[in-house]
Amino acid sequence: MSNSHDYEAWVDGSFKKGLPSFGLMIYQLEEGESSLVYHDCGVLPADGSRQIAGEIEATILAIMWAREYHRKESNVKMKIYHDYMGLQAWPLRAWKANDRNAKRLVNIFDRAIAQGIEITFQHVKGHTGIQRNELVDKLAASAFDNI
C-alpha cells in the first residue's frame, strides 16, 4: 500500500439574487474506489465578481482542507476539477492576481506547495453531464435555498 493520500476536489460557483455562492466536494481515492470525505456550500457577500468569487472560495477551501489534512499525513495529492477556465490561471501564474480573491488564492496555493502538497488542476466543460461537476453545481446553487 502506498503512503500517498490522493484526493479529488470538485469546485463550482453560482450567482443568484445578486450574490455569489460556492460548492465544494472532496473525494478520497483509494485502491480504485472513491468516497466523499467532505462537502460544503455557502453564500458570499457581493463583490462584483459574480460566480467567480464562488469558484475561488471553493478552491481556497479545498486547498486549506488539504493543508490541514497534511498536518496529520504525508504525501498528500489533490487534483482540483473546475469548470471556470481561468481558475487555474492565477495560482499557475498565467494571469496576474490583481483582485483580493485571486491574491488570496495564490497565497493559499503557494503555502500549500511550500508545505509539500501536490496540487494539480483539471478543467472540465460545465453543464455537459459530467456527474461530479453537475453535483457540485447543484450544491453551489443549493446554498441559496435558505436565504
Image (tube, helix red, strand yellow):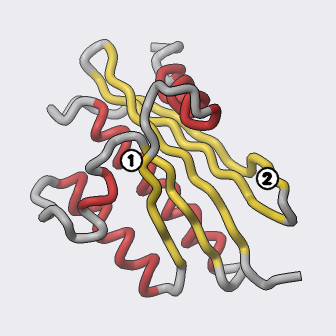
The answer to whether 104 is drawn above or below residue 75 in the figure is above
Q: Quadrant of the N terminus?
A: bottom right
Which of the pair 4/49 is nearer the observer?
A: 4
Q: Which of the 4 image quarters holds residue 25?
A: top right
Classify residue 33 as left or right of residue 43. Answer: right
Query: Residue at the location (44% across, 60% down)?
Result: 121
Which of the pair 146/116 is nearer the observer?
A: 116
Query: Residue at the location (31% across, 46% down)?
Result: 85
At numbered mark 2, what does the secondary structure look like: helix, strand or loop?
A: strand
Mark closer to the chain start, 1 or 2: 2
Q: Residue 72: which disc?
A: none
Give the image location of residue 93, x and y in percent: 22, 70
Q: Quadrant of the C terminus?
A: top left
At numbered mark 1, what does the secondary structure look like: helix, strand or loop?
A: helix
Residue for badge 2: 34
Which of the pair 70/96 is nearer the observer?
A: 96
| Badge nearest the viewer, 1 or 2 | 2
Query: Residue at the location (47% across, 32% down)?
Result: 42
Instruction: Inspect the image, locate mark 1, and give the three-letter code of the amino acid beneath it.
Output: Glu
